[in-house]
Amino acid sequence: VNGKKVDIASFKVSVNDVITVCEKSRGSERFKMFAENPKALPKWLEANVENFEGKVVAEPAREDIDVPVNETLIVELYSK
C-alpha cells in the first residue's frame, strides 16, 4: 500500500491509497486470471491491470455496497 508492504488483513486504506501486488505474487493463478479477465469494479475503485495496481478513488457509499448487510447487528457486536 503506497509502496510499503502490508501484511495485516484488516489494514484500513484511505482515499487515494494505491494498492500494488508484490512482484512475487503476480505469477499466482488468481492474479493471472484477473489480469486476463478483469471483473467490474465498484465505482470507488480504479484498477491498472498492466501494473497490478488498484487505487481507492472515493469512500464507498452505503448504496455502493451490493452485499446485504444488517448494520444493527454489526453495531451490536462491536458494542459488547
Image (cartoon, rainbow, N blue to C red):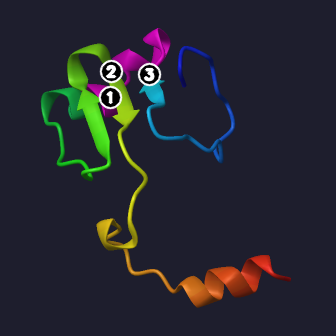
Tell whether 41 sits left or right of 16. left
Circles 1 and 3 in contact, beta carbons < 8 Å: yes
Tell whether 43 sits left or right of 1. left
Label 3 sits on residue: 21
- Residue found at x 31% / y 66%: 64
Q: In the rendered structure, which amino acid carries the disc numbered 3?
A: Val
Label 1 sits on residue: 31
Span colored in magenta:
20-32
- Residue found at x 65% / y 48%: 10
Quarter of the image where the N terminus is located: top right
- Residue found at x 86% / y 83%: 80
Q: How many marks?
A: 3
Q: Which mark is first along the chain, 1 or 2?
A: 1
Tell whether 13 sits left or right of 61. right
Numbered tag placed on residue 52 in the rendering: 2
Crowdedness of circle 2 by 10 Å Cα count: few (<14), some, many (20+)? Answer: some
Q: Nearer the viewer, mark 1 or mark 3?
A: 3
Q: Is residue 25 magenta?
A: yes
Front residue of 37 and 58 = 58
Q: Which mark is first along the chain, 3 or 1?
A: 3
Instruction: Say if 42 sits above or below 8 in the image.
Output: below
